Amino acid sequence: MAKKSSIRRFARAVFELTGEEHMDDTKAELNKVAELGKDVVIVSYLDNPKINYNDKVTLLHERIGGLSKTVIHLVYLLIKKSQVNSLPEIADEYEHMVDEFNGIERAEIITAKPIDDNTRKNINIKLSNLIGKKVIIGTEKIDSELIGGIMIKVAGKLIDGSTRGRLTKLKKELI
């Protein structure tokens, strides 16, 4: 839990230091550096206490130059704390904060087969009306176990409109 709270603090600090007009740029920069946090070789190098800090900074500038001061200082701090592998989670948390600021909720949909653009648009409209925020479908998953219908995860809730879910509910009612 301590790691989760430190990730939230780092993301909150970047969020507060970033002006509203630079939120999208900062989000893009954080996503760019988050790729570093996913590379095991680079993380091992940057977290290695035997390697000179200036060598780490040089590698950082070679791999991802042109970052804002806020993001570059965040990465420097994470290098000093040997927490570079936290970058992807910090980027995700920052994106969540920006979405919350903009009144956006991300949804995950799970279907038995891919959906078309018209269906996706209708789902967005209905979800937006249901929760009172703009909804963006973040991820779409195909689950061959579903017989039909759709499952939606949005705003911390699961909306089960799948045939499997309806059959399970009917079975509980009958027993």
Image (cartoon, helix red, strand yellow):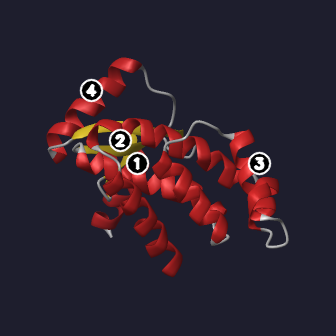
Is residue 41 found left or right of 120 in the rendered image? right
- N-term mark: 1 or 3: 3
Say which residue label 4 marks. Answer: 122
| C-alpha span from label 2 to label 1 | 9 Å
Locate residue 127, reporting x and y percent.
Answer: 23, 39
| C-alpha span from label 3 to label 2 | 26 Å
What's the residue at 50%, 28% (across, down)?
114
| C-alpha span from label 2 to label 4 | 28 Å
Give the quarter of the image for residue 48.
Answer: bottom right
What's the residue at 71%, 53% (across, down)?
57
Say which residue label 3 marks. Answer: 59
128 w.r.t. 74: above or below: above
Check disc 2 and give the amino acid type.
Met
Say which residue label 2 marks. Answer: 23
What's the residue at 60%, 46% (across, down)?
33
Contact, mark 1 vs mark 3 (Cβ under 8 Å): no
Instruction: For mark 2, give the secondary structure.
Output: helix
Instruction: For mark 1, give the secondary structure.
Output: helix
- N-term mark: 4 or 3: 3
Say which residue label 1 marks. Answer: 95
175 or 23: which is nearer to us? 23
- N-term mark: 1 or 4: 1
Instruction: For mark 3, give the secondary structure.
Output: helix
